[in-house]
Image: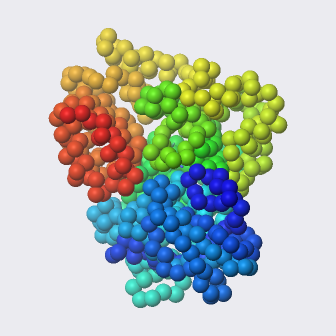
Amino acid sequence: MPRLDPHSYFDTDQPRTRHLDLDIAVDFARKRVTGQVTLVLDRPSSGPLDLDSKGLAIASVRTDAGPPISYELSPEEPILGSRLRLMLPPGTGKVVIAYETGPDAIGLQWLAPEQTAGGRHPFMFTQFQPIHARSMIPCQDSPMVRATYHAAVTMPEALTAVMSAGPQDAPAGSAPGTRTMVFDMPQAIPSYLIALAVGDLASRDLSPRARVWAEPATVEEAAWEFAGVEEMIVRAEQLFGPYEWDRYDMLVLPPSFPYGGMENPRMTFLTPTLLAGDRSLVDVVAHELAHSWTGNLVTNATMDHFWLNEGFTVWAERRILEALHGEGAAAASWSIGQTALAEAIARFGADSPFTVLRTHLEGVDPDDVYSSVPYEKGSLFVGLLERTVGRKRFDRFIRAYIERFHFTSITTEELMAFLEEQLPGVAAKVGAEEWLGQPGLPANAPVFRSASLEALTSLAEGWATGARPAAGQLATWSPGELLVYLQHLPRQLDAASCRWLDETLNLTSRGNYEILVEWLTIAAGSDYEPVFGRVREVLMKVGRMKYLRPLYGALGKHPRTRKLGREIFAAAAPTYHALSRRVVESVMEKYDG
Ligand code: BES
Ligand code: ZN
């Protein structure tokens, strides 16, 4: 009974799901998804079939021919959820499960109209990575299993659904007041890439194969911000081979979306905090697009190999950025990543197992240990391989890697075997065993420097001894350079310094959230009262975990900001995604007094 994925009841001896057919209704009044899923197995089978489920109420299970299938739902485990064991009668090729989602399904967020830009309609979206598909669909919820899917989704008439599929067919016939949309995903994907959002949505075409979806109130802004996406796809194809997913559409979600972006195939989900008005945050789109190769074509077999998804993708994102905006832009991105990695290693401790790339997370909730480590330590390892063999050979290797493993899910060990086959001796030369298996950052980590970044960081680090940027200099900084500068300033400044910075750099009024949040983190951590109103405004609106963690963390440093943090959280918590709430609670546990 081999269970090879510590986060799933999937059993490799049992049949695999080859296709899912969803027929579901989205019930906003009851905050439930109801309906049925048909699982098509890869072979006619009999005996036990173990599925993942979390909080689901199972109404019935039968074969597609009709006879009921007996089943057993085990008690819920905190991380895995409940094992749903079906006892298949001989020759079973399809099972049909009728069910309803639970009241607090972690993979779904239900938004009241006030939480949307339009303010008139409710909104619902899913976020299934890493292990939350099971809270909406009983399934083999492991990335080791890939399946195609088809879905019929019924919703209130005024709303529109998008999925990680499509393009969708013409709306099917519907009951009064409702509307049913039909989706088809013909490429086999792991369950964590199934995605659904329902709301008042409009779209704009950006190219023949790319479109952006958003609420009507934000769709024009979104179309302007992401207008360059086709050029990005073309550059990415030059680097990594043909784009294999037909369309690249994007959905801009309401601000409670807990991530910056999610690479749902054919429908990347994005936070509206990217709408800076100057296209300065499109690196997140480059990242999600890059997952179309590294992550969605070649997928981590389990969360213990998550760095394969994110490390390769951060490296790929920076190659796209370099191709589009030059080495300076890529260098700034590497520098920002280095700061994030140092913060994560400091938070866990340099000898923590959560700073290792190839992890052993049995008994650990992957959401609890989500950090920059797989991203930044992973991309440094890939960057080191690239530097060691040279770009030309490494680019050939990456293409061969994608071709060899596309539409499969692999382990770190499989990558390393392929590396040894293609580029013999390189792993030993770079010390791959330490990189993959030891905590902290190896001494041979590559450093991506540029003269202008060095100047910026030493200017910032010289703050206490009176170093200040000259007015003429400031005007030439890109948003990325300004961010690097802010990241290297002391974390605590006096009020006069805060005032000088804000007046000189207009920080509190910025629309670029990376800069705004970095600034508010410094200012709140310095107990600088003039920003408290803006901090409240941001925290009452935005649920992106990347911003909640440092802001609530900074508020923990002084008695009156702790009080402010607690007060804001009490008011904002009901509007946050459950994952975001958990992150803030873990930050606040460390508040003293
Ligand atoms: N796939 C991730 C988001 C994710 C990872 C969700 C693990 C749940 C579990 C996505 O591609 C991502 O990395 N997003 C980043 C973007 C950034 C690195 C450019 C984010 O949300 O900040
Ligand atoms: Zn990613």
Number of numbered markers: 0
Answer with left or right where residue 251 lies relative to residue 487. Answer: right
Which color scheme is applied? Answer: rainbow
Residue 363 image position (x, y, % from top left): 51, 47
On-image quarter of the N terminus: bottom right
Q: Residue at x 28, y 57 (%)?
A: 574
Residue 10 visible in the picture: yes
> Where does residue 225 sit, x and y in percent of width and height?
46, 50
Q: Is residue 144 above or below residue 172?
A: above
In the depicted view, which residue is nearer to us: 115 or 278?
A: 115
Residue at position x 59%, y 84% in the image: 68
Residue 426 in which image quadrant: top right
Give coordinates of residue 244: x percent, y percent.
70, 57
Residue 277 in sight in this render: no
Q: Among all residues in the image, which is located at the extreme top? A: 465
Q: Residue at x 37, y 55 (%)?
A: 578
Which is nearer the eye, 472 or 282? 282
Tell me: residue 20, above or below residue 395. below
Seen in the picture, residue 328 relative to 272 is either above or below; the reply is above
Looking at the image, residue 559 sits to the left or right of residue 343; the answer is left
- Quadrant including the C terminus: top left
> Is 203 left or right of 145, judged from the image as shown?
left
